[in-house]
Structures are given as C-alpha cells and as structure tokens.
Image: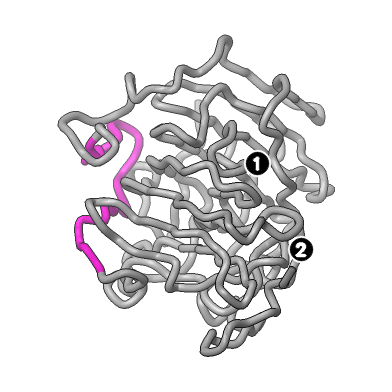
Amino acid sequence: MGSWMTRAAGDPPVDPRAASAHGAAPAHGVGIARHGAALRNGGRTIALAAGALVIAAGAMAASTAGATGDGVDPSGVTMPTSDGSGWTRAFSEDFSDTTPRGGFEAAYTDRFSVYHGFADTAGTGKYTATALTAHDGMLDMRLRTTAGGTPLAGGIVPLVDGQWGGQTSGRYSIRMKSDEVDGYGVAVLLWSDANVWAQGEVDFPEGALGAPAWLNVHCLEDPAEKCMHQETGASLADWHTYTIEWTPKQMSFLIDDEVVGTTTENIPTERMHLVVQAGSLQGTPPRNAAGSLLIDWITIDVPAGSSPESAAPAQDG
C-alpha cells in the first residue's frame, strides 16, 4: 500500500514547502495528525475545560428545513445575500462559474487559494488542485487514490477582497454535503494567520465523509486538547448549512440556523482565516474508495461598521 510519497508517473512532486506558497498553514502539510478519525457511531461526547457551553437539545433532523435563504439551488437553499443586522458581507461564492474537470484553481484564482503539492493533515494523502472542479453550481472536491497509490486531497482558503489573510472576528457559513468515502474526512476550520497552533483552532464541521458532523474547539493553553468536543445530530451525508459566529466574548455554532453550541472560553484573539480541507484520515484509505465533498456556497461576514482588514467589532453590552 502506497503512502502520500508514492507517486504515479507524471504526478507533480510532493513538496511540503508548497504549503506557505499556496497560502496554507505549513502544519497542514507536514503530517501532523491533529484531526483524528471521527466516530461513525456512538453517543454524543463532550469534553470541556472550565467555561460556558450551551448545547441545543434534541437531534438535528437531516433536512434543509429552516436554513437561511429562499429559492432553489443545487442544495435546495439559495445563498443568502445578507445575514441581517450586526454583520456585513465580506465574501460570498456560489460556484456558478463552471470549470473543466480539475480546472478550479485557474478559474477561481482571484477568489481562492488552493492547496497543492504537499501532504494532507494525516500525512498519507496529497493535496492537489486537480481534485477540484466547479459544476452544476457546486464545488466538487473529488477524493480518490491514484494508480500510483497516492490518496488525493483538496483544500481551499477564501480570499476576502482577493487577499489572503483572516480576521479577529466574523461569521462564516458553508453549505455542504459529502458522499460516504471510507478513509477520508473533512474539516472546515479557523486557523491562525501566523500558523501558531496556540493561537487557536476551531473545527466546524469536522468528521469522516458521510458520517456525523462534529464540533471541536482546541484549548488555547494546550492546543493538542479539545475543550469542546461534540457530536452533532447532523450527518455530513446530507445538505446542511454550518455557521461559526465569532465575537471577542463568545463563539456560537449553528446548523441550519439552529444553535448547537456556544462557548465563552478558548476564544481566539489573533487573526484567523477560514480553511476547507478534505483528505485522508489517520492511515491509508482503501485504494477503491472514491467520492466527493460538495459545497454549494460559502459566505464570510464581518461585524457591521468594520472592514475585513480591521474586523474589530464593538464590545458587547
């Protein structure tokens, strides 16, 4: 069984240094397995440091009802044009520009930085721009193993105002679903612009493709530990809208506009940017495993009255 370092003839070389060249956190390209495999079964697990946590009662139905927006889109819910009072839209993308197979990077270069040429988080797969295609109003991250035994992965960073870099607060929404692909997972995360793990990591949603969606907030004092670790009632196999609301005093997490978790602890204070990455979980995926992560749309908002560069909201209260 090949590893991410096993290449088929003609594959581009794996170069961990390419991480920073493509606007990615280098830690994502050196085989640091921070994102463990999500459980496919079992009850909700919550491990908390001291702090406030509110969890919505009941299971999340696997439907699109209650999600923001109107009209019809590939997922049944159109990208909202605004998120109401308190927020200002800074970035939006509904992937309406169709690309040739594997041609996403060239067509969307002004809107996204694309991971390419370095190892995925588990260290067994390789990020490649050729895994990404826009079609039918969706971004398709197609995950599979090459003839040479290399599991392929996909990763993108939205470019707010065409520039790489994050904010110190914001509202981030993504509407997505996935096939169930054995050995592969997805993480939608906020990651430090400075690539310093101790500045924070927020993963929502995260999980094995086609499995339950998890919420993970890493502890600032010990980022190897998760101070929020919660299985939600939503399945990544179904269309859902996942939202992170981040202010200096609180982070809230929503699925289809319903709050599933809130914390006032371990809130990042440094600039963070949004990342969407899908790749191999710990170990090497089966060679015949293949499928897609599909993204209908992504939006990023900043607090009203601030710019993406400052993103410094007025204090609550």
Secondary structure beneath dot 1 equals: loop
- Between the C-alphas of marks 1 and 2, the distance is 23 Å
Q: Position of residue 128 (x, y in %)?
A: 50, 73
For the point 53% across and 52% down, the residue is 168
Q: Position of residue 113 (x, y in %)?
A: 43, 70
Q: Image quadrant of residue 52?
A: top right
For the point 72% across and 23% down, the residue is 42
Q: Which mark is residue 140?
A: none
Amino acid, disc 1: Ile
Q: Is residue 106 left or right of residue 15?
A: left
Q: Position of residue 211 (x, y in %)?
A: 58, 35
- In this view, 17 is above or below 137: below
89 in magenta: yes
Residue lying furthest left: 71
Quarter that holds the N terminus: bottom right
Tally the numbered discs.
Answer: 2
Q: Which residue is mark 2?
A: 32
The stretch in magenta equals 78-99
Q: Which mark is residue 267?
A: 1
Determine if residue 299 is in view: no
Q: Nearer the viewer, residue 262 or 270?
A: 262
Determine if residue 229 is in view: yes
Q: Image quadrant of residue 14?
A: bottom right
For the point 45% across and 36% down, the residue is 243
Q: Image quadrant of residue 204?
A: top right
Q: Nearer the viewer, residue 129 or 284?
A: 284
